[in-house]
Amino acid sequence: MKRHYISALTLAAASALLAMPAAHAGDAPATSHYGSIERAQAKRATELLDSAVEYLQKNGPEKAFAKFNEPAGPFVHGPYYVYAVDMDGFMVANGGSQVGLVGKNEIDLRDAAGKPLIRDLLEQARVNDTGSIEYRWLNRVSNHIENKVSQYRKVDKYILCVGYYTPRGSVEEAQELLDKAVAYLKKSGDKAAFTAFNSQQGGFLHNDLYVFAIGIDDGRYRASGDSPQLSGMDVRGLRDAAGKPMVEEMIKLAKSKGSGTVDFVWRNPATNAVEQKHSLIQRVDNVLLGVGYYSK
């Protein structure tokens, strides 16, 4: 049978869809899965930061910092809040922890991994007026130390920041999710399994982990928890950010060994950075199932 690959235009669209946030009708609730929550988090952080910058520019530092510090004020939205330092490292506002931080020079403040958080922020802001920093911080909602990204904007001599958490799935969690998907496919059959893998409520999304399924013979997506709209698309010609044909390698590995890992580089939609990704795959009849996790 003649193999029909997706066109270059369709391939580009597929790459964009896979690597970029899906459109949402609104902000996802804090309890939803990665396909909604991480991308909504970045969006909400940006929106709050934009509002804070505008408020500071219109009202001046004294009024703005007082407003940012209000525990139940307009610049504290659950886990999203504004914090601000001056170029000497003096904490002038912090909607998440007014006690103990505001009013002090925090240039030596370090994250949970010992990273000099404020020093790094100041060094970066001296070069770029806008950007982001990554660090490890306590998530008071989950009570776990997690990866956090803070977007920042320099306004005159102040740096305004809004952060959001980006929990990463581990290789152990990826393998556990893949094993769960394999068992479910064998037990429930193609139709029920692919429907579950494609659903936000199907039980196959965890942090930044999701299940995908690709036909070994035709190279078409049966399911993709991250981008269910791609179901039915032939992705054998899909390449990573470095030009590697990772889907072809997955199919080849599934045919020859039945399971294994394919490494490639891909944009992490949670951090918006191109990172190493590792897809664990396993063959079940004429379908390969996979779960990928990111590492830096």
Image (tube, rainbow, N blue to C red):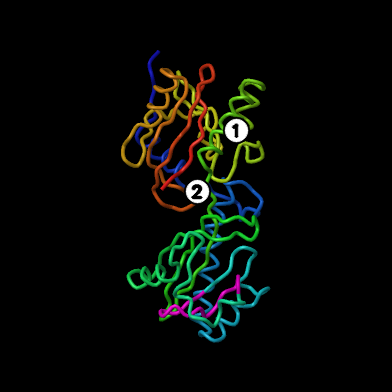
Question: Height in image: 271 above or below 216?
Answer: below
| Residue 236 position in % (x across, y down) | 40, 27
Residue beneath the point at 59% across and 35% down: 198
Numbered disc in front, either 2 or 1: 1
Q: Give the distance between the C-alpha atoms of the residues marked 2 and 1, in whole angstroms.
A: 18 Å
Give the quarter of the image for residue 74.
Answer: bottom right
| Residue 287 position in % (x across, y down) | 51, 21
**First along the sequence among labels 2 and 1:** 2
Q: Amino acid at mark 1?
A: Phe
- Residue 197 circle label: 1
224 on left or right of 19? right
| Residue 128 position in % (x across, y down) | 35, 69
Residue beneath the point at 53% across and 53% down: 166
Residue holding disc 2: 21
The local secondary structure at tag 1 comes to helix
Find the magenta span and give its range. Answer: 84-97
Q: Amino acid at mark 2?
A: Pro
| Residue 23 position in % (x across, y down) | 54, 49
Question: Height in image: 295 above or below 131?
Answer: above
Q: Residue furthest front?
A: 114
100 on left or right of 295? right
275 on left or right of 186? left
32 on left or right of 45? right
Q: Residues within 10 Å of mark 1 (few under 14, many from 20)?
A: many
- Residue 143 circle label: none
Residue toward you, 273 or 260: 260
Q: Residue furthest top?
A: 1
Residue toward you, 202 or 181: 181
Residue beneath the point at 66% across and 40% down: 201
Locate the N terminus by quadrant: top left
The answer to whether residue 93 is magenta is yes
